[in-house]
Image (cartoon, rainbow, N blue to C red):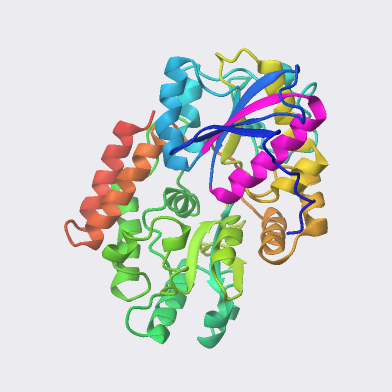
Amino acid sequence: MKRLPARPLDRRSMLKISVGGTAALMIAPKGAFAQGASIKASWYGGQDTHDRMQEALALYSERTGTNIEVEFAPFGDFYDRLPVQYAGGGAADVHRHSMTFLYEYTNRGLLADLGPYVGDTINTDDLYPGVVEIGTRNGVTNAIGNNQIAIATFYDMAKLEEVGMTDRLDGMTWDDYLEIAVALGDAGGEGKYGTNDAGDFLGFFEMWLKQRGTELYPEAGGVGFSGEEAAEWFAYWERMRSEGGAPPPAITAESGGFQNAPFVRDIAGMQIGWCQQLVFYQALMEPELGITTGPIAEGLDNNGHYIRALDFWVVPAQSDNPEEAAKLINFLLNDEEAIAILGLTLGGPASEKASAILQDTAEGASAKVLTYLEGLRENADPDTPIWKGGQGELESVLDRLNQSVGFGQITAEEAGEQLASEGQRIID
């Protein structure tokens, strides 16, 4: 994607004050430090996200005279630190929040109500349906989405062409997905597979359930799936592994991070993930990559995919600068130059305005993601359900059980019963 010229982040405008798992910097207008407002912002992500966020915040600082202290870290390090910051009163005035943990923070009353700022300080007119609503419970808006994303299948275009399977990607069913993956593994030979093992991907499991008429988290609480349904999921992935469509668990266990994915290491021809990740994978790979839907159950009235915000801007209830935080959120969501700078680093665009801006300059993988989302919206599932408290723990349980089945330590049936019973215990 073409970007506006980078604004120099020199010693006068950015001062590093600490480093480690979490990096902390100060962004200030030229002639630092200004006598304007001061605010703290933080986020998680990879280096591309860190670079683009700093560039966008430097622009905001120049325009408004605001001094901005920033902290950023990889996802895991960020959430190791965040509870400590909330407990000690040091959380940023505005920070990125994942839906994996959002419910827990809202349920404990830790996040400010942004409702008084919506429509005045924060313009939400152009945001897609659900971007504000998914962060609103009982009439209180504690979070506003900074993206909209959906599950997708990424694939090596040349490898799919070589096995003659490209035409089966359109409307790909779960049976098609298995057969394509096995064909890719067979064609690749020893040590090659068709796709990553996504049996540990809770968002993918949620989509699979929804396509069969089951909600991951029903309104009544707990989990909505039965042990039998979960067992069917584990059995599907056991078959995928046993037929060579997905790698064994020993390889999957070493696949953390984009750079270690079987897809990137050229031992798999497909990868399941969130749609914007195509940009990250393409940056690491030479072959041209394509994007299509995840598998779809036969007979559905829609494509069985959710398009929803999974990351948000929030303000802690303890913040002394909620008005300034709201102004910064509005800038990140609505400023045309900020939208262009951020591109897809936070996910798919959260608004029609952002989509239009990015489509004008998008190239390569970024253009493919935008086209994918545009097409998906025409026939996507209309719901935008929120994840519940305990989501992160349930993700860990699913990962552990999928590995246990893969290593032959338990059966798919046993794993299904355990996932259902532990889910009922874990989920609020």
The image quarter containing residue 53 is top right
Which is more toward the observer, 10 or 279? Answer: 10
In the displayed structure, 120 sits above or below 301; it is above
Residue 2: x and y in percent read 76, 58
Q: What residue is drawn where x is 47% and y is 71%?
A: 177
Q: What residue is drawn where x is 70% and y is 34%?
A: 13
Image quadrant for the N terminus?
Answer: bottom right
Position of 320 with respect to 409 (left or right) is right
User: Is 47 within the magenta?
Assistant: yes
Residue 312: x and y in percent read 60, 34
Residue 195: x and y in percent read 43, 69
User: Is 236 within the magenta?
Assistant: no
Q: How many marks?
A: 0
Question: Is residue 25 visible in this depiction of the protein?
Answer: yes
Image quadrant for the C terminus?
Answer: top left
Position of 237 with respect to 10 (left or right) is left
Q: What residue is drawn where x is 16% and y is 57%?
A: 409
Question: Is residue 307 visible in this depiction of the protein?
Answer: no
Q: Which residues are magenta?
A: 46-72
Residue 58: x and y in percent read 72, 36
Q: What residue is drawn where x is 57% and y is 84%?
A: 161
Determine the residue located farthest toward the left in the rendered image.
409
Which secondary structure class fits the magenta region best? helix
